[in-house]
Image (spheres, rainbow, N blue to C red):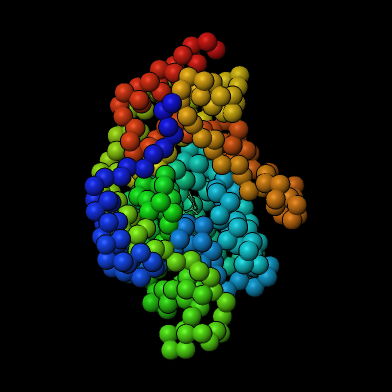
Amino acid sequence: MIPVSEPRITEREREYVLDCLQTGWISSAGRYIEAFETQWAAYCGMKHGVAVCNGTVALSAAVVCLGLEPGDEVIMPTFTIISCALAVVENGGIPVLVDSDPETWTMDVNQVEAKITPRTRAIMPVHIYGHPVDMQPIWEIARAHNLVIIEDAAEAHGAEYKGQRCGSLGDVSCFSFYANKIISTGEGGMVLTQEEDMAERLRSERNLAFQRDRRFYHTALGHNYRMTNIQAAIGLAQFERIEEHIEHKRWMAEAYNERLREFPQLQLPIEKEWAKNVYWMYGVVLADDVPFNAAEFARRLYQKGVETRPFFLGMHEQPVFRERELFIGECYPVSENLSRMGLYLPSGLTLTESQLGKVCQQVHSIFKTI
Ligand SMILES: *Cc1c(COP(=O)(O)O)cnc(C)c1O
């Protein structure tokens, strides 16, 4: 079976983790945390990094800092992971959705303005599968309406918008370092910001809102969102190879593109002229005239030894939100089509050229018969 994604671990990770074990710094203090925060923030062009235990809570911590009042709204794409909507809902806010751009699969920025109300507080652009959102219109709308931009860059480590790295395109940005992300800590995440007071609030939110001078005296409710030094040690080792990881993803995309271009049955990922796509996952979308959907395509590929993953299902189609009477009657045709016709092919950092060739052969053998 060719796996859909695998992390790449080397001697360097072993060496740094062993150092944590030998020195006893296994919990959430230690030099790897600081080094990883400082270096990742600097790489992304932001002043402060606050490491947390996963990308989902990174988004939550960022939303907490908005100080939402019940009923305040945050605009986001429907086509994303549930973490985005969860972060808003659990903080008393209401996610307000827009559809996707059919080419880049990121939020359709032309739909944002029409969704603004007096309750809108923030916009949450999400760079999908490694391709950045078209930020210029978002910047203009945010400035005009005094909105905060929370950037979800969990799929876009090292990606660029007009030469500027993802993670530096909003007021605050969130990353995940889950096992399948471009750099990983196993489980992990980080929030980046330019503002020292925002960083302080994030650190407090991460650490149970303990106070510096009176530790067990609380004026706020925080969480335990801490990352361990061991995770940060893995992250730092991964970070030292980030350019290699990105090169591998870009090689993979080029190699897939070359071999799959001949199939009119498939829409392939693109790279806008203003973007550097890091192709976190290599997604394909079946054309309308293909007589089966992505679930059936996935089943056939699996039978031939190729693992795949389905695309996201839009937030407006989630039973859990319908139950809460969110998004009733809303429909987003681009997202709905992506969910039914899209999947991603094996895209891991260990994928070899011969594996990639086999995947394409199997795709070929499926399309030959239709
Ligand atoms: C992976 C991911 C997250 C969540 O990260 P976890 O570390 O898995 O909690 C959030 N947003 C996007 C876009 C992601 O891909």
Q: Position of residue 214 (x, y in %)?
A: 47, 89
Quadrant of the image containing the C terminus:
top right
Residue 92 located left or right of residue 277: right
Q: Position of residue 1 (x, y in %)?
A: 43, 26
Residue 61 located left or right of residue 336: left
Residue 92 located left or right of residue 3: right
Residue 233 seen in this snapshot: yes
**Image quadrant in which you'd find residue 164:** bottom left
262 shown above or below 37 = above
Number of numbered discs? 0
Residue at position x 44%, y 54% from top? 187
Q: Position of residue 176 (x, y in %)?
A: 43, 54
276 shown above or below 368 = below
Instruction: Identify which residue, 137 or 44, lies in the foreground.
Output: 44
Instruction: Identify which residue, 167 or 15, lies in the foreground.
Output: 15
Q: Which residue reaches farthest top?
A: 369
Residue at position x 43%, y 58% from top? 189
Residue 134 seen in this snapshot: no
Instruction: Identify which residue, 145 or 165, lies in the foreground.
Output: 165
258 shown above or below 89 = above
Residue at position x 44%, y 43% from top? 129
Q: Which residue reaches farthest bottom?
A: 213
Residue at position x 27%, y 66% from top? 23
Instruction: Identify which residue, 153 or 346, lies in the foreground.
Output: 346
**Image quadrant in which you'd find residue 355:** top left
161 shown above or below 255 = below
Q: Position of residue 79 (x, y in %)?
A: 57, 45
